[in-house]
Image (cartoon, rainbow, N blue to C red):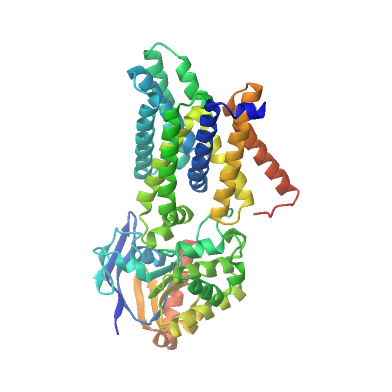
């Protein structure tokens, strides 16, 4: 059975896309988690719901409008947060609810929920097309290259903004870069786990990896490995048992987190 | 000798108070300047202006004879050690990671090794920063400041909340950096005794500049020290 699964081309596409998204979410998510922006991915995902609805209404491929709406609204809310000194969690709440509100109004204008909307809400990795796979790989590659090139600036401004500024790092621009990359990552990942579970991929593997890793690179590698394992095992199990891949993937990563907590409680990992 | 820093008529106004009022002084190459003053005297505000973290000030701040409003190049020559660096205890970075954050490019392993050894943190290099004591963390931040070969080291009350043994080690390191490596040091502190022992120049700040000159002059003038101590005490009582 298991070998037969691997012979299907839709499964190849699902696994390749899933692995790319797993890598992308864990790396970008690590910066968000460490900046106490864990729910920002969730907020962007919810705002993308408005973009998806807009695309369906206008007859445009919904992910394109989702990219536009998510990135623009994430950048605007970050600007508003800085300018009016709104706290991070409050700005996330504003972004999250406004995205859903816009989406609901547009959907009701266009005659109610359709099957397309549900596939975006809950993910549809087994239906991913060749074009989607190519796009996912290209965006993953591009973002990873940016992160590698800007690694020191990204890490330093995440660690301590004030010191990074004194060292001449353009912290504000770096913050916008992270938000921009998070926007692209979220919309790219919608096909894997859907709007509702996206923040799980950003947060859970990283929270787990932080318990294991020492340095930053080690933590990022552990997070990527946990994320890839959850996605691959999740896709295969969900196919075998005919259950939702999104929920299965997230439950596996929660299982890995719970296991790590157990190991830590038993004193087998250092307290930090 | 070259003027490293020249501050002229610096004024910082907050809505209800002047944090700094007409502060002027000069720091020359090789100086070890101790800036003393009670809490709320404006020491951190002064540093924020010098480090371009606060740009809402009147007056002129020059580094290497250049107005810092016109050029930010001077920041490359500064190693900055903040009062108590704020970071998540679980932040997954090792001592090595933190020290390398100060570098423009990954380079010169030997130099990094030397600095870690000089600061007695070589054996901690693979430990996570959050696992270290306050004194060890502070030495890591000095190491980070030093890897870029700065001409000036700026330290904002660097020993707050650190045990006495670590403080002694910290001070001996500062003395060596100034005397052997000729790094100009600007350092704010509450501790008059430490300033007396280490600094060759003193600036007494209490929103205005109460005194600036050679530390011998200040500490040998009992009247001046008493006057400063009384002013500080009044400020302290006012704060409480």
Q: Quadrant of the C terminus of chain A?
A: bottom right
Nearest the eye: B210 or A185: A185
- A192 sits to left or right of A173: right
Q: Give percent across and percent down for residue B192.
A: 49, 78
Q: Residue furthest top?
A: A111
Q: Residue at x 45, y 85 (%)?
A: B180
Q: Give percent across and percent down for residue B121.
A: 58, 71
Measured along the vertical axis of the image, is residue B106 above or below residue A170?
A: below
Q: Is any atom of residue B14 visible in this view?
A: yes
- A262 sits to left or right of A35: right
Q: Give percent across and percent down for residue A115.
A: 48, 15
Number of disc labels = 0
Measured along the vertical axis of the image, is residue B172 above or below residue A152?
A: below
Nearest the eye: A178 or B69: A178
- A115 sits to left or right of B169: left
Q: Quadrant of the N terminus of chain A?
A: top right
Q: Residue at x 62, y 37 (%)?
A: A253
Q: Residue at x 51, y 33 (%)?
A: A198
């Amino acid at each position: 059975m298991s070998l037969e699964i691997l012979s299907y081309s839709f499964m190849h596409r699902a696994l390749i896309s899933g692995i790319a998204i797993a890598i992308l979410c864990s790396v970008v998510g690590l910066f968000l988690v460490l900046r106490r922006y864990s729910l920002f991915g969730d907020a962007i995902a919810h705002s993308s719901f408005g973009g998806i609805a807009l695309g369906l209404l206008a007859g445009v491929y919904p992910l394109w409008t989702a990219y536009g709406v998510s990135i623009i609204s994430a950048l605007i809310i970050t600007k508003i947060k800085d300018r009016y000194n709104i706290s991070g969690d409050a700005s996330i709440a504003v972004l999250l609810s406004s995205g859903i509100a816009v989406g609901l109004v547009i959907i009701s204008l266009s005659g109610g929920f359709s099957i397309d909307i549900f596939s975006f809400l809950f993910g549809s990795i087994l239906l991913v097309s060749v074009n989607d796979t190519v796009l996912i790989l290209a965006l993953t590659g591009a973002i990873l290259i940016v992160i590698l090139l800007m690694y020191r600036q990204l890490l330093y401004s995440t660690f301590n903004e004030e010191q990074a500024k004194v060292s001449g790092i353009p912290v504000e621009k770096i913050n916008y870069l992270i938000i921009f990359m998070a926007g692209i990552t979220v919309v790219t990942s919608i096909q894997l786990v859907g709007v509702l579970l996206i923040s799980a991929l950003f947060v859970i593997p990283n929270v787990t990896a932080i318990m294991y890793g020492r340095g930053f690179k080690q933590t990022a590698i552990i997070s990527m490995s946990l994320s890839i394992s959850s996605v691959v095992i999740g896709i295969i199990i969900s196919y075998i048992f005919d259950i939702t891949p999104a929920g299965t993937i997230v439950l596996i990563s929660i299982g890995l987190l719970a296991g790590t907590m157990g190991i830590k409680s038993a004193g087998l990992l250092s307290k930090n | 000798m070259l003027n490293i820093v020249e501050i002229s008529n610096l004024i910082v106004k907050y809505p209800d108070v002047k944090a700094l009022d007409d502060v002027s002084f000069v720091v020359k190459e090789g100086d070890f300047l101790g800036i003393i003053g009670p809490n709320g005297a404006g020491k951190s505000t002064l540093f924020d202006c010098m480090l371009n973290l606060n740009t809402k000030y009147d007056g002129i701040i020059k580094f290497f004879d250049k107005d810092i409003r016109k050029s930010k190049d001077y920041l490359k020559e500064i190693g900055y050690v903040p009062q108590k660096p704020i970071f998540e205890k679980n932040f997954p970075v090792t001592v090595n990671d933190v020290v390398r954050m100060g570098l423009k490019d990954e380079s010169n392993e030997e130099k990094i090794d030397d600095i870690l050894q000089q600061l007695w943190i070589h054996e901690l290099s693979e430990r996570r920063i959050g696992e270290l004591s306050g004194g060890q963390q502070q030495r890591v931040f000095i190491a980070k400041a030093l890897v870029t070969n700065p001409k000036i080291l700026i330290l904002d009350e660097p020993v707050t909340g650190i045990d006495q043994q670590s403080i002694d080690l910290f001070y001996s390191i500062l003395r060596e950096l100034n005397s052997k490596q000729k790094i100009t040091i600007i350092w704010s502190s509450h501790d008059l005794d430490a300033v007396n022992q280490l600094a060759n120049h003193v600036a007494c700040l209490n929103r205005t500049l109460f005194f600036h000159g050679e530390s011998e002059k200040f500490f040998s003038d009992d009247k001046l020290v008493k006057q400063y101590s009384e002013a500080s005490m009044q400020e302290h009582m006012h704060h409480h």
